Image (cartoon, rainbow, N blue to C red):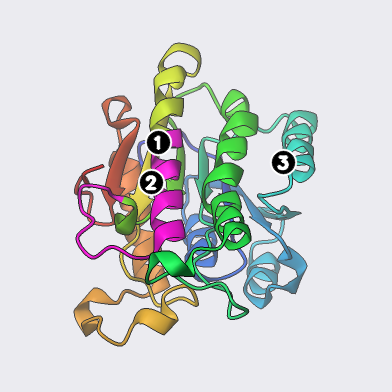
Amino acid sequence: MLSSFPPNFTALIQGSSRGIGLALVERLLNEPRVGRVLACARRPDGSAGLARLAETHAGRLQMVQLDITDSGQLEALADGLRAERLRPHLVINVAGILHDGQGLAPEKRLEDLDFERMQRVFAVNALGPALLCRHLLPLMATDGKAVLAALSARVGSIGDNRLGGWYAYRSSKAALNQILKTASIEARRRFKNVVLAALHPGTTDTNLSRPFQANVPDDKLFSTDFVAERLLSVIDQLELGDSGGFFAWDGQSIPW
């Protein structure tokens, strides 16, 4: 896997402390072509999973504290990459928010809309990834293929919306898709080897989906390891002509 990337490349995973992000870090560390993995999270030191991987992959895993909604921390990440002369070939943003168990939940009707809650969802799901693009696109490797991807969601598709509801989550993921599409157009001029993509992981057994799994068939509820393997396979197959696209875990295009 990942044969389309050069040997000994650097990967950066944002939102890596658990779930799909942690599974991606583990998969990448077990890939022979990957030289170094930067695992970014709000509290990386509090992740037992990252601590375990740090013990077994000493020297190849670097944990970085990063809140994607904090522009100062994003600037510090970029400064650190410049200082170490690190140019990632692969950047994946996994961080996202749907609910928090403290009042934030998907809206079922217009009366449920709340400005501050919507603002928080947009900050994590769209605005932070936009600033991640701003800071990291100019720093990505120029020797061979490079990919900047972010986890979106099928419910962010306007064309596929048949059920309504989930206003903040749907619209923030639609905004993320537009940001990636727009950045891909600029990248054709400025960062010509970089492929940008929005990725739908499917319904994955994580804290994000757990309250909504009751009606999901067993064969449609995926493990984090399965999703990590499938997403990396999709990324490996991406070509420059795919930049700005929206793809599911099985490689199929999703309508906007």
x, y percent for residue 136:
61, 32
Instruction: Kindly report which numbered mark, 3 or 1, lies closer to the viewer in this rendering.
Output: 1
Q: Amino acid at mark 2?
A: Ala
Q: Secondary structure at mark 2?
A: helix
Q: Earlier in the sequence, mark 3 or mark 2?
A: 3
Instruction: Check disc 2 and report the residue beneath it.
Output: 174
| Residue that extends furthest to the bottom in the rendered view of this protein | 214
Quadrant that contains the C terminus: top left
Q: What residue sits 30% from the left and 64% below the top? A: 202
Q: Residue 22, located in which quarter of the rendered image?
A: bottom right
Q: Which stretch did the figure color magenta?
A: 157-179
Badge 2 crowding class, 10 Å Cα cut-off, few under 14, some 14 to 19, many 20 or more, is many
Name the N-terminal-most of marks 3 and 1: 3
Q: CA distance from mark 3 to mark 2?
A: 23 Å
The percent position of residue 179, horizontal first and vertical second, equals: 46, 35
Tell me, yes or no, whether the two marked residues, 2 and 1, touch with CB atoms within 8 Å: yes
Q: Position of residue 226 (x, y in %)?
A: 34, 68
Does the magenta-highlighted stretch encompass residue 211? no
Q: Is residue 142 left or right of residue 196?
A: right
- Measured in 3D between alpha carbons, the distance from the residue under mark 3 to the one under mark 1, in whole angstroms, is 21 Å
Question: Does residue 9 appear anywhere in the picture?
Answer: no
> Is residue 107 or residue 15 the one in the foreground?
107
Give me the disc on residue 178.
1
Q: Which residue is mark 3?
A: 74
**Mark 1 residue type:** Gln
Instruction: Name which residue type carries label 3.
Output: Leu
Q: Position of residue 187 (x, y in %)?
A: 46, 20
